[in-house]
Amino acid sequence: TTSTDAALRTPIVAVLGHVDHGKTSVLDKVRGSAVIEGEAGAITQHIGATAVPLDVISEIAGELVDPTDFDLPGLLFIDTPGHHSFATLRSRGGALADIAILVVDVNDGFQPQTEEAIEILKRSETPFIVAANKIDTVPGWNPTEDAPVQATYESQSDRVRGDLDEKLYEIIGQLSDRGFSADLYWRVQNFQNNVGVVPVSAMTGEGIPDLLTVMMGLSQRYMKEAMEIDVAGPGVGTVLEVKEEKGFGTTLDVVLYDGTVREDDTIVVGGADSTIVTDVRALLKPRPLSEIRTESRFENVDELKAAAGIKIAAPELDDAMSGAPMRVVRDREIDDVIGEVEAELADIAVDTVEQGIVVKADTLGSLEAMSNALEEAEVPIVRAEVGDVAPRDISVASTAEDPMHEAILAFNVDVLADARTAAENQDVRIFESDVIYRLIEEYEEFVEEREQ
Ligand code: GTP
Ligand code: MG
């Protein structure tokens, strides 16, 4: 028998959007730390998680948030770098994120990765709001640092306000073209049926109070029941990244969305060839209000409760896959837990056929998103795997009966040097991109060329 310890966990918020639209900057503003400054070329290299407690939110949001109105403990933000697919963020039953912020640059509007994010949000039925970012770049903008958006909007000239309105209505129109009824957030009554657009500037902090208020309100109103978990129960999470870490060997960056993980736990993790059963060696926690990916030194912890981002050091993790499930065994039968992990993996598995193309992707979630998109495009798949393009992939593609199938679609992975040479020798085409629909478009062009 296990003791139960019911509690409300922190909602998991994914921040997504096109490259450079300001995902990291928005979070950075919220954190008040300069993560972005430590980033090479301001490109985010890895997924990180940031916990922002309710009292910090209410401090930033000022009079917009009264902490006594809330009983959720805060928000856990996951930053998805532009080159990394939001599709990794999946969990048992769908999306890992409970809620999402789609960041759109007001000057650029919808871009390829915005489209991709929208598709995945739609498919996974994840509620989201749009942060229309970089409002400070409207010519003639008169900034009021960290102000709520309506106040700053009032203090702009008619012309500036008109320019901003035009950009915002463009975004609202783009959302409605994709089947989402949307409006400026203060006009939205029901956030379940409408997408709220929050004008913000990650640079000046304008609109950030509104963004946090809306996220907190949405979570509290629509997600409270889903946040009730048994915190003392065995932990359940999703692997975001598998990383070498000096002194620890291969480690897992995991987002824990249920229960607790402890230093002496045995865990079961989805692996490329088989399910991994291993003992936790160390639990490494990012410091409060910082991100996993910027930590050079980790803090050792005895245990950690959901929701949280955690780095797990353990033996035998080399085969673990990004996007795979992780479950703590605790006082249950190991075989039962292996069964649960395998059932989750089978749920993600891609259907393959005798004749088709080869697909490689960086994570299980992106592999799944690729296969969904290829199914829609009616392109059959002979082999679908997580990992870099290797010589054996070329062998498979080169033996295709149909010349149209002598192709490999590589999503956000490397092509090993010997694989590239083999592909050239055997006339196998490799398509590489970090945008799913671009891969498919390029493949379709290739098919047209070969048909002629
Ligand atoms: P990736 O992680 O590479 O996908 O990018 P990102 O979406 O995290 O964008 P990031 O936060 O790195 O911002 C990209 C660039 O836009 C940086 O040079 C930021 O300084 C700039 N930027 C972000 N937000 C704002 C804003 O509100 N106003 C202005 N003027 N610049 C901004
Ligand atoms: Mg970033």
Image (cartoon, grey):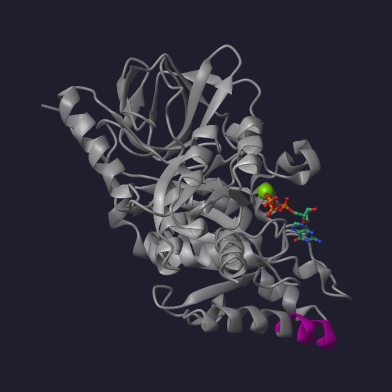
Residue range corresponding to the magenta coloring: 157-165
| On screen, residue 247 above or below 448 | above
Image point (70%, 52%), residue name: 25
* Quadrant position of ligand 1: bottom right
| Residue 445 quadrant | bottom right
- Residue plotted at (58% across, 73% down): 197
Residue at 51% in and 67% down: 118
Horizontal arrangement in the rendering, residue 63 relative to residue 386 (left or right): right
Question: In the image, residue 98 lies at what x, y percent?
Answer: 40, 55
Residue positioned most to the right: 140
State the residue in front, 251 or 396. Answer: 396
Residue situated furthest left in the rendering: 1
**Is 220 a magenta residue?**
no
Q: Is residue 75 left or right of residue 16?
A: left
> Can residue 89 be seen here?
no
Quarter of the image with the C terminus in it: bottom right
Report if residue 131 is visible in the image.
Answer: yes
How many marks the image carries: the answer is 0
The residue nearer to you, when weighing 123 against 21, is 123
Residue 203 percent location from the top left of the image:
77, 57
Q: Main secondary structure of the magenta part?
A: helix
